Amino acid sequence: MKKLTDNVCYTKGIGPKKAKLLEKLNIHTLEDVLNTYPRDYEDRTHITNISDLIEGEKMTIRAVVGTEPSVKHIRNGMDITRFMVYDDTGALEITYFNNKYAVSLIRRGTEYLFYGNVKEYGNRFTMTSPVHEKCDENTKGKIVPVYPLTAGISQYDFEKLSQDALNCEFPKDNDPIPKDILEKYDLLPLDKAINKIHRPQNMDDIANARRRIMFEELFLLCCGLNQMKQHRKHEQGAIFENTNLDDFWSLIGFKPTNAQLRAVNDCIKDVKSGKPMNRLIQGDVGSGKTAVAAALCMLAVKNGYQAAVMAPTEILAAQHEQSLSPIFAKLGIETVILTGSMGVKVKREALEKIEQGYAKVVIGTHALIQKGVKFAKLGVVVADEQHRFGVNQRAMLREKGDHPHTLVMSATPIPRTLALIMYGDLDVSIIDELPPNRTPVETFAVGENMRRRVFGFMERQISNGGQVYVVCPLIEEGELMLKNTENYAKALSKVFPHRRIGVLHGKMKPSEKENIMSLFASGKLDILVSTTVIEVGVNVPNACLMVVEDADRFGLSQLHQLRGRVGRGKRKSYCIFFGADKSLLARQRLGVLTQTNDGFEVARADLAQRGPGDFFGNRQHGLPILKNVDIISDMQAMEQARYEAEIILDNDENLENYPVLKNRIEQMFEITGGTFN
Ligand code: ADP
Ligand code: MG
């Protein structure tokens, strides 16, 4: 008898060649096959009368073959086979192309189930290349799993593999979900769920199996995150005694908002507690998160520690450095910047200063987490625009110090439940107030017919001393993108021959990017044509108009981020999205942005319209990928999983009574490279 640990190559018809192909799907053993769930099902249980067939839909009929299959050779060795079948309600033609094998099994006078697409040719219906199965009285038709495939592997191969896997002895006591939870939520035990997901008898089986599998995934995730949080409770954190920030606030040039003060006070409570801080600051674009980060860095330095601020792009790192280092310098604090593109010599100097502790505040990109970077005494770590970093990168930065206080900042507003899960290991402060005297960015969604007026509007803004961002049409990355941005800028310079136009795209050298950014920031450019590299965090308060081409092709949250680049200073600001004329949907989506400036509301609309792919689908957040969860419809399950995870871990922090669960959590977090401790 086969075992689940057996390699797939021993399954009949597979062999080493196909086993190699299966590796592409990450399938090595029969157990891997069991864990590869069908991506869909074909419901062949519902039998339709021939008289009720509908064109264009896949349907099952139960019919007797009435004529001898006749083969015709047509051009290029193509065979076409036709025959008629009938049931009590009518007759239908069946057609196969180049399928001698299928045809050879068909017998006149015998009854089959045919499952396939019906098309109308001329005035008659034909079912083309149906799947067929001989039947007797008991045949009911079945629900057939549709597996994810790779070239060279057929559904038939997969069916054999999954059958082999299902025939293996299933390990006992292997369910990571405790029995009482299964009962409480009426969930299938693991073995039953696996069986039903691969071989459902009816649609209910599929729904129940999926519900159980999804719950498991959420439950494992919640337990894992909760465990991280629990473990951290035992860690010792540096205690910052001196928390007076009067000198800092007097230098920063504005009065902090109440929301900023609240966030800073949350941080102060944390850094006095003796435990390492682990806090997320959520605040809409422009809410002034940088000042909170700076205040925290200040606290580190005052108490004899270094602080590191990690930004997702070089532009952003440079910008932070430019705005913060003068303030720190007035207090005698040295700031250095560290990015991947720095020259060897400058970098070596920076590294030395960091290692010897002269550099008190270090601002940089991912370069900060590289091996060669050593801190003398790192006490505070800040990750800006957290959604761009993974849990993992956060952890790597943290490891540069001895349990430093960690602050992550995000402008991606997400619903509460989702936040609790994605940031399940963090405490959260919310900045729900914008600095005073901001007027909301006035937003328009327009079509091509408005182009001339928009250009006129741009001209007026520039004449009044303002500056304009234009985000370029969206096309593929790579060479083409580069050309596109530059061509676009060229075309624009014909419209605005007397204006200074700069170009910014991801393929430029960091030093070039920085140069362009600082030209724009210092008012030496009127228009900045850019790809979405400016999406994150860039701050040029004099810019008062943002024009986005092809806006219908961006996510709403991303557009909201782009819009956040303007309305940062005293000027009344505007945002114009092109693309509203492309479809009704485009107009509706972009319409959301014209109606609200509230990032949370935008995110909610975005989630509802586009689904959660962006939140859980990509890997940037560094959490394990959830394969079976749909955030919107599974909100309730999420709450339940989180609740149960909390109870279990409160009572048994190391999961000593739950070895299977413990094991599975470790696997889940390991696979995605998440650091788990
Ligand atoms: P974000 O939260 O998007 O990172 P920033 O920290 O970049 O926002 O702040 C946006 C702009 O608002 C900056 O120009 C900053 O100097 C300014 N700002 C921040 N806090 C205040 C405040 N309390 N009063 C006035 N301006 C502020
Ligand atoms: Mg920011």
Image (cartoon, rainbow, N blue to C red):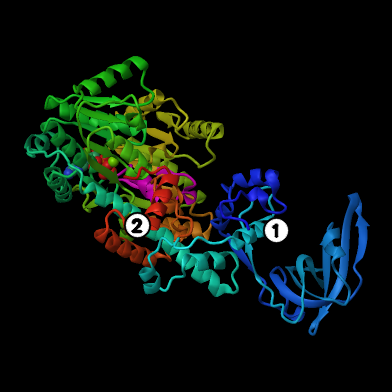
Residue 625: assigned label: none
**Residue 279 image offset from top left, x and y in percent:** 23, 47
Screen quadrant of the C terminus: top left
**Quick one: 302 or 580, which is closer to the camera?**
302
Would you identify the image quadrant in which residue 247 lies? top left
Q: Which contiguous range is marked in magenta?
A: 547-575
| Quarter holding ligand 1 | top left
**Is residue 47 placed above or below 328 in the rendered structure?**
below
Screen quadrant of the N terminus: bottom right
Q: Is residue 601 shown in magenta?
A: no
Q: Amino acid at mark 2?
A: Cys
Q: Residue furthest front?
A: 1
Q: Earlier in the sequence, mark 2 or mark 1?
A: 1
**Is residue 627 placed above or below 119 in the rendered structure?**
above
Reading the image, the residue beneath label 2 is 222
Reading the image, the residue beneath label 1 is 156
Secondary structure of residue under mark 1: helix
Q: Is residue 552 shown in magenta?
A: yes
Q: Is residue 603 left or right of residue 290?
A: right
Would you identify the image quadrant in which residue 524 lies? top left
**Residue 93 image offset from top left, x and y in percent:** 84, 71
Local packing at callout 1 (Cα closer than 10 Å; few below 14, some 14-19, many 20+) is few
